[in-house]
Image: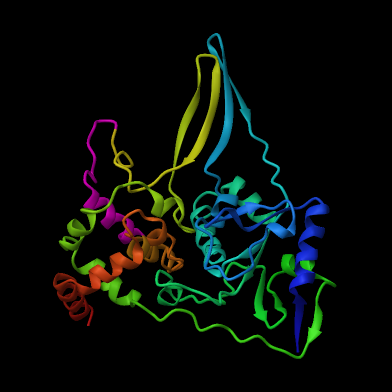
Amino acid sequence: MSEAITQAALLSLVDDWISGGRTVSGPSFVKEGLLLYEDLQNAGQLALGKVIRPADSIKKYFLPRHEELYRYTFAGQNTCLENIDLVPVERVIVGARPCDAAALPVLDKVFNWDYVDEFYTRRRDATTVVTIACTLWDDQCFCTSVGLGPAVEKGSDVLLLPLAEGYEVRCLTEKGQRLFAGKTTPSETMAAAPTGPERKFDTKEIDALLHGDYENPVWRDIALRCLGCGSCAFTCPTCHCFDITDEGNASGGCRVKNWDCCQFNMFTMHASGHNPRSNQAQRQRQRIQHKFRIYPDKFGEVLCTGCGNCTRNCPVSLGVLTTMEALASSDAGRDATENAASLKG
């Protein structure tokens, strides 16, 4: 036995959430050909058809692009501070892709391991994530290569698996159970989990390569076409770099947190003018090292969910997958992997 809901009933439920005062977000076409996660005015804006995934990620609902930390004013020799009292909206994200939801437990570790980011945590607590298992994927999808899949439950409060006339509803958390309580019907049908894209690389081999050949010339070759625009990081579900700056004038202002990107020229610029990663090859290497070696060494999992957004949104089609393929196919990469494996053995 399972619990199910028809698509018409799901859309009606979305309208009920909106009319009840919740903020509901989900995949929506903002213009022809551009699918983004957007706040919905009604269920009719929700894109549940044959689409791969939005061009952005749900991280923006937990880590905003621009966030005020506190305000300040100057009064003579005194500085007056005003704390921001964040009261997050009660949000439901419906139709999220599993590769987006799977990023949330990864980000939880970043924002809570040595200091609890209350703004991030409050937004997490106020948000319920309803994912829909993927039945379509393209050449840029590689969730199965990083230990996930098109129906992975990680990070979801509710997982919907497509049936002939609706969805099997799997409530995974108490938040999910409350959201769908009394809204589903018993069903004899169990949905089959999609197989997902074919595995395209082995993370253990990549780990050995990254430990074994830091000066692989493939970084230089890849960087020749990198524009340093930041599209990869800004549309990635797991990239979380930010900068803290003061914005204001002589009478006061506010201290804010803004998204940043390791591919920007000034990302590691010191006040002295020295830049330890002064060229794009070094910055590309750091991005992949962070996702597949540095973060796993610290937290035990890769900093990537295989969504493919980095490649899709890159003006020159450079992303994690294309980089992995370049590394795996390079003679230097193969030698490094073999040498590292023999040292470990």
Please state if 111 lies on the left or on the right of 11 as rendered.
left
Q: Residue placed at 46% from the left, 66% from the top?
A: 307
- Identify the magenta region: 271-290
Image quadrant where residue 232 sits = bottom left
Magenta span has 218?
A: no
Above or below for 108 versus 268? below
Estimate the x, y position of residue 298 in percent, counting from the top left.
40, 62
Q: Can the viewer see residue 62?
A: no
Q: Can the viewer see residue 180?
A: yes
In the rendered image, which quarter contains the N terminus? bottom right
Q: How is the image coloured?
A: rainbow
Above or below for 336 versus 219? below
Q: Residue placed at 32% from the left, 60% from the top?
A: 288
Please state if 238 lies on the left or on the right of 45 as rendered.
left
Hey, which residue is sitting farthest front in the picture? 32
Which sits in the foreground, 163 or 29?
Answer: 29
Q: Residue placed at 35% from the left, 64% from the top?
A: 320
Hey, which residue is sitting farthest right in the picture? 182
Please state if 36 lies on the left or on the right of 311 as rendered.
right
State how many labels appear: 0
Hey, which residue is sitting farthest top in the picture? 76
Estimate the x, y position of residue 186 in percent, counting from the top left.
81, 84
In the rendered image, which quarter contains the C terminus? bottom left
Which sits in the foreground, 117 or 220?
Answer: 220
Estimate the x, y position of residue 293 in percent, counting from the top left.
33, 64
Estimate the x, y position of residue 214 in percent, counting from the top left.
19, 62
Which sits in the foreground, 4 or 77?
Answer: 4
Above or below for 92 versus 325? above
